[in-house]
Amino acid sequence: MKMKAARLVPFDVPGHKRGRGNPDLTAFLGEQALSVDVNSMQMLDNLCHPVSVIREAETLAAEAFGAESAFFMVGGTTSAVQAMILATVGWGEKIIMPRNVHRSAINALILSGAVPVYVNPQEEPTLGISLGMRLEDVAAAMEAHPDAKAVLVNNPTYYGICSDLEGIVKLAHTRNLKVLVDEAHGTHLYFGAGLPQAAIHAGADMAAVSMHKSGGSLTQSSLLLCGVNVNADYVRQIINITQTTSGSYLLMASLDISRRRLALEGTEIFSHVVSLVEYAREEINALGDYYAYSRELVDGKAIFDFDITKLSIFTRPVGLTGIEVYDLLRDEYDIQAEFGDLGSVLAYVSVGDRPKDVERLVAALAEIRRNYRRDPAELPKIDYISPVVKCTPKEAFFGAKQSLPLAKAKGKIAGEFVMCYPPGIPILAPGELITGEILTYIRYAKEKGCQMTGTEDMELERLNVLK
């Protein structure tokens, strides 16, 4: 506000000069947005080295989330995940993590040269979804790799599954391991009542939080939260290796505004979200065939808890894959779900949704069941595939490679990613053995319309493999 009141004459970047130089863009985004798309200046502070208003805003964010320190991230939670890994493990050092991590975590291993120790997640036998890390499996990994430096946990997963985060933290800290948490889908856990425990509240050392998902800020804006045992000044140095020096003030302002709203109204906001999701779950389950699952899955181990704000819907009893229902919702009913995979579809419900939106979703699912239902026996069972790691992601990604047709890649070592996006969890990561089972999975995912990403060949007819 002080900057706008000063009526500054802009002889700096950006070149659109508060929108005057690009009237088409101003007409599209609005003069108010363009007027605050500005560059670092003294009164606005600098994201790379904040000493005034950005530092104050980050301090307020840390207080709101119960962290020792917080960093505004304008490269999405991808940059936050990579920063916390790069700040914790280096070349040749080991990090224990579930295999169903987001590609950003494995990309961080490519950058750092760290070595993953995978804890293969359990699979829910009916739903076919990857679960959390069991405490005993994490303990076994620590015992087998006493030189590990850190543990990475997903909390919650895309489907709403939570691990025993507090138990993992206590176990890791007895061995002087840092606990890093990919909390991209967990902003609301810090403010809602009756939800699973948030990472920093459980004693985690660092957590990457997607404020733009359930927190209401602009896309690409996130937070990196740090606990008391983290050198925040060093973390900022790591962040500055990869984060832009031209931080967007639109994104930072959205983080600050959203933080304030959550701090003041978060409990009420997420109570509303929970009530919407619970109503939707009840209505969808009443339709028949579909299964919108919830806390009845909790077993205290691989499903230690469940995030009840997640509206994950198992579609295979209707004879349709999740991606087929996802496509039908979009193409036939103008409903954009978050993602669909080979077994489930996820409808992301937030404070911006209304009861009539939920009613429309339920009605669409009912019609899809009535008009498109098939024999579920026609769908092949797709199970989680445990990877066979042959070398580190860094060695594979930067190693000498050749491009082969999919049919000839069996038995080779992957030199690139293959994944459905969203959710961006690799089917195949650099350094892993390409098996016939994996190739069958890839072909089936392509056939069903999953958006396949990660490969140099955009059509995914060929794969880069190590020579």
Image (cartoon, grey):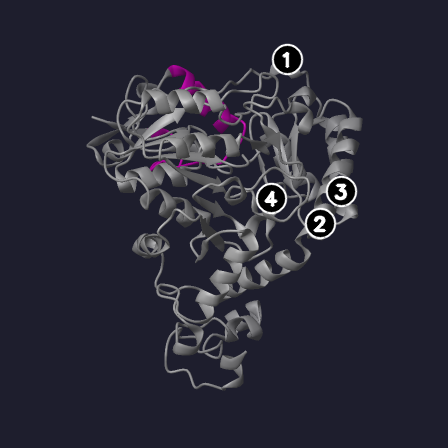
Residue 189's disc number: 4
Type of amino acid at the residue the image marks with label 3: Ser
| Mark closest to the chain's N terminus, 1 or 2 | 2
| Mark closest to the chain's N terminus, 3 or 1 | 3
How many residues crowd mark 3 within 10 Å: few (<14), some (14–19), many (20+)? some
Name which residue lies at 45% across and 85% down. Answer: 8
Marks 3/2: CA–CA distance: 11 Å
Residue 439 colored in magenta in the image: yes
* In the displayed structure image, the side of residue 385 where residue 293 appears, left or right: right
| Mark closest to the chain's N terminus, 4 or 1 | 4
Q: Say what secondary structure mark 3 lies in.
A: helix
Residue 318 colored in magenta in the image: no
Extreme residue in the top direction: 377
Type of amino acid at the residue the image marks with label 1: Ala
Spot occupied by residue 37 in the image (x, y as percentages of width and height): 47, 71
Q: Look at discs 2 and 4 and give the one toward the viewer.
A: 4
Q: Look at discs 3 and 4 and give the one toward the viewer.
A: 4
Residue 101's disc number: none
Spot occupied by residue 108 in the image (x, y as percentages of width and height): 34, 41
Contact (Cβ within 8 Å) of mark 4 with mark 1:
no
Name the residue beneath numbered marker 2. 353
Marks 2/4: CA–CA distance: 18 Å
Name the residue beneath numbered marker 1. 377
Region rendered in magenta: 436-462
* In the displayed structure image, the side of residue 146 where residue 184 appears, left or right: right
Q: Look at discs 4 and 1 and give the one toward the viewer.
A: 4
Spot occupied by residue 239 in the image (x, y as percentages of width and height): 35, 54
